[in-house]
Amino acid sequence: MGQTQKRRTTPPECSYFKLFQILVIAGVFYFSSGTQVTKLVNDKAHLPCGYNISAGELTNARIYWQKNNEMVLSVIHGKTDVWHKYKNRTIYDTIDNSSIVILGLRLSDSGEYSCIIQMKKEEYKVTHKHSVTLLVRAEFPKPNITDVGNQSTNIRRINCSTSGGFPKPHLLWLANGKEVNAIKTAISQDPATELYSINSVLDFNVTNNHSFICVVKYGNETVSKSFTWQKSEIPHAPVSYQPPSLYLLLCLFVPVFVISWCLLKRFSARQRERRRRNDVESIEMERTSSIYSGTAEPSG
């Protein structure tokens, strides 16, 4: 008496329903939970399905691989059929739980792939579904800087280029830590592969020291290459002796030889003329002396 009796309360029916919903959602998540695969262009990608089918069950199985509701591959009653876009580069792997391998990856292969398996008991029913997200990346290699040469007396040109990447790149030049303007920058895209190429030209004054960095940004990635220029210093060391060249010797010897030959020829001519005069004078003297001798004899 005077005590209140506690009544037993039964759990509401809606709580059982919520529990059932949670279990269903968990089951759906378990059977259709996806994975992500990241690969590079021209590489190969292994896309798992995660469901094992024995050789005996294969005749009663239908296996479909599709990408964004577009067919990739099907296996029906053990016969494999590959759609045109993936032909000659997609392999069905019966040993590894109904997975597929895509070779020679392209940028367009990126997307969500679904593996759907139907098994026949009385009729075909979906017994497994699995999704795989494939991300195909194309990384730009480290840029290459080429010294093009002088454009004028004090102006020199360098060229920075790289290719084979995605998405669309952006290139900038840094000189001693500060951004500088390029002469021109060109970007092109291959329509077949969708890959980009970029090329940029920079001119600088050779009378100063420089430290350049070519930076290429694409998406969240960056690649770069550095280039250093040291101005030429005037040497203070004494110039070493270089023996005269043959050409220089000839240039010096030939005029000396010609002048000497001319002088010798003139000297020889004068000598001959002097001897001739001496001979003439001797003859005249002999003739004169004979005349004088003839005149003196009668008076004796």
Image (tube, rainbow, N blue to C red):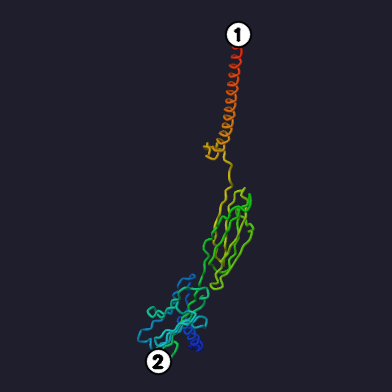
Residue at image coords 51%, 83%: 70
N-terminal of the pair, mark 1 or mark 2, is: 2
On the image, the x and y values in percent for residue 251 come to 57, 38
Which residue is labeled 1 in the image? 298
Q: Quadrant of residue 261?
A: top right
Q: Quadrant of residue 256?
A: top right
Residue at image coords 52%, 73%: 107
Which residue is labeled 2 in the image? 121
Residue 284 vs residue 164, the one in the foreground: 284
Q: Considering the image in quadrants, where does the C terminus appear?
A: top right
Residue 281 vs residue 57, the one in the foreground: 281
On the image, the x and y values in percent for residue 38 come to 48, 71
Q: Quadrant of residue 274?
A: top right
Point out the residue furthest to the left here.
56
Kind of residue at disc 2 = Lys
Please, is residue 194 above or below residue 121 in the view?
above
Looking at the rendered image, the disc whose residue lies closer to the viewer, 1 or 2, is 1
Secondary element under disc 2, as helix, strand or loop, is loop
Left/right placement of residue 181 relative to residue 32 reads right
Kind of residue at disc 1 = Pro
Residue 199 vs residue 130, the one in the foreground: 199
Residue 233, label in figure = none
Q: What's the distance in space between the residues labelled 1 and 2, CA to CA?
A: 179 Å
Q: Residues within 10 Å of mark 1 (few under 14, many from 20)?
A: few
On the image, the x and y values in percent for residue 27 come to 46, 83
